[in-house]
Image (cartoon, rainbow, N blue to C red):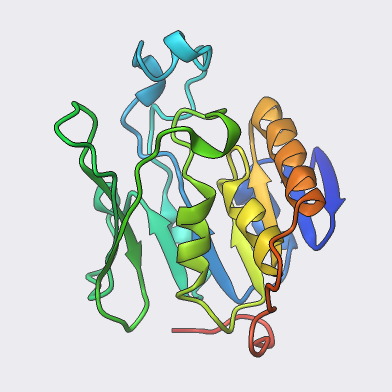
Amino acid sequence: MIKKEERIGDCRLILGDCLEVMPTLGAFDAVVTDPPYGIGITKSNRLAVSRGLGGKSWDDEAPDLSCLPSVPSIVWGGNYFDLPPTRCVLVWDKNNAGRDFADFEMAWTNLDQVARRMVLRPMNMDGGKQHPTQKPVALMKWCLGFLPDAETILDPFMGSGTTLVACAKLGRCGTGIELDPDYFEIACRRVEEAYRQPDMFVQPPKTATQGGLDL
């Protein structure tokens, strides 16, 4: 079940298997997550071995996302999963200028909004990349902007903790679950640092929903 837990500010970080942990946590207002896509990215010499991030197999198989609660959700890598049709796709345009990485990544949402795009180069990411598929904090803060009334945010695939770092900086209550103990410790350090260097003049969500929203 829960192997280890840290509470840092308004964030709760849990080491464990999300399938076992989530049923014990109660309701959340929204989900913002970046699950493994099942494409074996850790086998890439460029992204893993050359950066000291290899030796892990968490991305060999994509998870079954039917475990996610029925609340407003943003799921990165949505094109890799069997998810319902959506009118609100979020696109991270990496502005790669011809480099051989993917030009963009896509997030599936169940939000009743129009599709949106953020142009953001991933270079020099937030003090250094500590996870092969780490997202920029600015990208996750952008995602939370589509959930203005959500106070409690769940990330069941926490990784290095970027979603919770964004929660800390925007005054949200984030809960993250991570299976890998090394990434769990990295996430704890990053969230602690986020609280030491908070964003100025950040307002909390306009209203906090009570429990989750069934769509």
Looking at the image, which residue is at 25% across and 72% down? 115
Looking at the image, which residue is at 28% across and 73% down? 88
Looking at the image, which residue is at 49% across and 74% down? 70
Nearer to us in this view, 51 or 32: 51
Instruction: Report whether 132 appears left or right of 151.
Output: left
Quadrant (top left, top right, bottom left, bottom right) of the N terminus? top right
Nearer to us in this view, 49 or 157: 49
Instruction: Report whether 64 appears left or right of 183.
Output: left
Residue 172: give x, y in percent of width and height: 69, 69
Compared to residue 215, the image places residue 69 above or below, namely above
Residue 180: give x, y in percent of width and height: 64, 30
Compared to residue 192, the image places residue 179 above or below, namely above
Nearer to us in this view, 196 or 55: 196
Residue 23: give x, y in percent of width and height: 67, 61
Could one spot residue 159 in this view of the protein?
Answer: yes
Quadrant (top left, top right, bottom left, bottom right) of the C terminus? bottom left
Could one spot residue 1 in this view of the protein?
Answer: no
Looking at the image, which residue is at 70% across and 73% down? 201
Residue 49: give x, y in percent of width and height: 44, 9
